Image: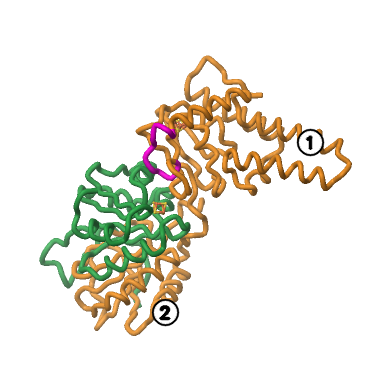
Chain colours: A green, B orange
Amino acid sequence: MFPAGETGADLSNGNCMSAAPAPIRILYCHCAFARVVPADVKTGVLAQLAASSAEFEAVPDLCEMSARRDPRLAALAAHESLRIAACFPRAVHGLFQAAGSPLPQTAQILNMRTDPADKVASELLTGGAG
Amino acid sequence: MSRLDTAHLRTVLYEGPGSLPLEPDARSRIMVALLDKGYAVTSLRDSTHVTALPRDFVVVLGRFTGPPPLFDGAAALQFEQIDGMDPSDVVEAADRVHANTGAAKSGAWKPWFPVIDFGRCTNCMQCLSFCLFDVYGVSSDGKIQVRNQDNCKTDCPACSRVCPEVAIMFPKYRHSPINGDQVSSDDMRREAMKVDISALLGGDIYSMLRDRSVKAKSRFSKERDDERALKERQNCLLKLQKEMDIPMEVLASLPSPDEIRAKAEQAAARAREALGSQVSPEVH
Ligand code: SF4
Ligand code: SF4
């Protein structure tokens, strides 16, 4: 076991330094502390992400991150082609703005409150209209 | 330190060089288990790029085949071998690391607070005047702000009802458009009606609350039958609860009429100051 500690900026594995790794552009919100996103939709989306070869960030609750102005929101919002699975786009934009990290208009927000898991997962993984 | 300012533990589910991959089903179940316990998870498959930030603790979980891979970066990460573990064991491993770091735990507070849609907000400060719990504030450039999110009363969307522009969202609310759904012209008509109703009642919803409470009090004082008095009070609260969808717990914990008056005056003064207005809104 290695000691825990505070981490610096972007970390890269010394074993795999030949190519610059692609930044993660998929963010999945688990809405863990409320029942507003149907459970079958969120677990369905997560299962399809996990079954793909995509790398992604999964967070328990974007609302909480916004409330504590989590600096990771700024890092995520810096991606022009970010795709987010969460809830209503107006709310998600508001949450990033409230954290001081407004999303670019190019961010694609998929709504797990209204859309089925297959549609959300496929748009997360392949892009498409959002 | 506020619970919102503290460091959190992040997990990285690492399947890159120096480790064995997980089956998709195992990967998914481990992630659900960690997320349900409030841990953020970064799923890394081939690349090894993690954006780690100074105030986070990071534990890298993997089926390591030898010494943990070397990560670049100034600070240390913690690595945990998860080969052969089921999801609950992985969560236990994360819990152990968490206990050692002293990092805050997500989920201690249901994140319930207003989020302003600045595309709609006209900076009228009605929300600031209305809120008794100092949730709202004003930025240095005079703009309305949500400042003390964790002061907000869980499941209470009352301030969204006083916003004439339908600009206040509660993402975890049940109904449109307060949950962030698009605002329709019907919603705008309803909101305009609400403001009119509030104006007819004296322009101040807290004065309505106080009037009801005073009326209820005078009824109670004359009322000898305790049971009937209790029923009256319950009816009164039920009506308010229905009108504004205010949870019973919030109504039951409202400050006394005098405290409400003092807080409402303070909030209105802050709003007036922010607006630089010469016309003082009436506070009863
Ligand atoms: S952003 Fe939406 S989906 Fe995510 S935690 Fe908040 S309400 Fe739930
Ligand atoms: S009441 Fe609505 S429009 Fe007025 S300042 Fe508050 S959020 Fe903005």
Q: Residue at x 52, y 59 (%)?
A: B108
Residue type at the position of mark 1: Lys
Q: Residue B152: x and y, percent?
A: 54, 45
Of the pair B64 and B155, the residue shown nearer to us: B155
Say whether disc 2 or disc 1 marks the residue closer to the N-terminus. 2
Magenta-tinted stretch: B178-187
Q: Quadrant of residue B51?
A: bottom left
Chain letter of the residue carrying label 1: B
Regarding mark 1 in the picture, which secondary structure is present there?
helix
Q: Residue furthest top?
A: B278
Of the pair A121 and B68, the residue shown nearer to us: A121
Chain letter of the residue carrying label 2: B
Q: In terms of secondary structure, what is the magenta stretch mainly?
A: loop
Whether residue A1 is situated above or below residue B238 in the rendered picture:
below
Q: Residue furthest left?
A: A18
Whether residue B223 is situated above or below residue B105 in the rendered picture:
above
Residue type at the position of mark 2: Asp
The residue where tag 2 is placed is B89
Q: Is residue B251 left or right of residue B74?
A: right
Q: Residue B74: x and y, percent?
A: 27, 62
Q: Residue at x 47, y 62 (%)?
A: B105
Number of the label disc, if any, that sits on residue B217: 1
Q: Residue at x 54, y 15 (%)?
A: B279
